[in-house]
Amino acid sequence: MGETNLNDGRKLKRVLGFAPAYGAAVGLVVSGTAMFSVGNVGAISGNATFIAAAIALVPMMAAAFAYGELTAMLPGGGMISDYTMPALGRFWSTFALLSGYVLLIACDGGTQLVMGGLSMESLVGIPQPVVTLALLAIILLINVFGVEFYGRAEAIVTITMMIVFAALAVAGFAGAGEPFGADASIGGGLGLLPTGGIGAVMGSVGVAIWFFIGFEFACPMAEENLKPYRNIPYGLIVGLITIYAIDIIFVFAAVRYTPLEVMGTSAIPHVEAARGMLGFAGGIIMSILTIAASFTTANAYCAALPRMLYGMSREHLVPLIFGKIHPKYRTPIPGLIFTAILILLTVVYITINGANVDLVLTFIMTACITWMISYAIAMIDVLVLRKKYPDFPRLWRAPAAWITLPIGILGVGYAIYTLPDYWLYAGVCMAVVAVYSIIWMKTHKIKIMGKMPIEDLAKDIRERSEYLPVWDEAVAEWLESRKAV
């Protein structure tokens, strides 16, 4: 099953450090739809957005703890599928990845590129489809020619984008745009709570989840990180804290200069807010930022999903072709092509239907629900593996896991509870994934609820990936101790 037949011993290169891990962690959450949700929640919750965002941050931080520990245990490209296999079995492993990520990437990936294209069209008049397809082509080239190119591009563009977004938020909050034609402050009389009171704030928690969702896209690059057991957990945590701080500063400035009804009815509330804070220049900067965000988001998708499929193919849970890597560039080309096709189909569909924002958001929030369920599965994985394999090497551990992770699971449940309009769509999508998974496993004579021993998975990761100091030695010692028992 192997690596040798597919790749003749070639392995993904271990070249990345903390910056690419941090870039991947924030590359998805600093996206067009994330910035849209910031403006949308600001319109609902006003100055109390920091409360809704803080509540949403609780389950997201718990999920970051879970992914940090799981990556430190099993630093393989399969990510959620690798983690779930020894904990809950093959069915839940396949379900978590396909329902949580394939649907999301198909919906949101295309949406992001369309938003980037629309922003460019509004700036210079180049038609949206031309810009969108050009962005997709550039991203494909970056990912084809190697993860090192991806790591450099993602880290540089994302961190630059974060700095610009932060500067925009701080400048707006400080009133720097008023001398240059920005709107006069209108939010001085707003109280802490919005018109709808605390109920409106609590009801916006589900949408506020979108501020942070996607941070774990650093994890599938564990096989290419020099110290994944340190760089990835801290990249996830620092990324979430960074996002919270910058988004809250932006919202405080937005509600100070932009009428809440304008942000609540606009398809681009973040651009309206930037225009209100800093005038015409603010609108231009935010439009450019949206284009950059579409690039980093699609880039993160095209880096992550192929590596998840690469890991799953090793266990015959998806076609074996996804386990093949390019002989020269050592990148998972079949998975990359599949991901690009998913994104392209969504781009074409949205473009043909006139980039209907309501339709797009329906897809996004549906995917958000299924994605949050995959977060809950990851947290359950940690608790199950702690019980089942208490002595397996954990070079990074989730703090107070038996307290923080159940709280995180409850938080995910509450966030889903606040999105009742999308329950039916999410249920249908998950049912389709469940039926597919059962048919695939039955057809290929795979035990549906069968679990893979963690020692087999650890051996497989060691065989298929380049040598990882400390982890390799710790796992080798643990495997020897298992033989002695």
Image: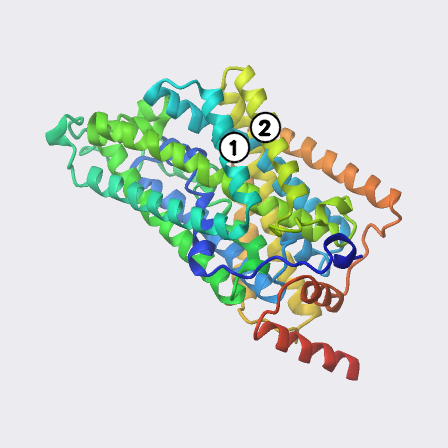
Is residue 205 something one can see in this rendering? no
For numbered disc 2, what is the local secondary structure? helix
Other-residue count near label 1 (Cα within 10 Å), few / some / many at <14 / 14–19 / ≥20: many
Residue underneath mark 2 = 344
Residue underneath mark 1 = 136
Q: Position of residue 297 (x, y in %)?
A: 48, 39
What residue occupies the far left of the structure in this picture?
179
Who's the residue at 55% across and 27% down the image? 362
Q: Position of residue 454 (x, y in %)?
A: 72, 66
Q: Position of residue 279 (x, y in %)?
A: 20, 27
123 lies left or right of 104? left
Question: Residue 484 sits in which quadrant?
Answer: bottom right
Quarter of the picture holding the C terminus: bottom right
Mark earlier in primary sequence (1, 2): 1
User: In the image shown, does 11 or 459 lie closer to the viewer?
Assistant: 11
124 lies left or right of 436? left
Q: CA distance from mark 1 to mark 2?
A: 8 Å
Q: Are the residues flagged by discs 1 and 2 in contact, CB closer than 8 Å?
A: yes
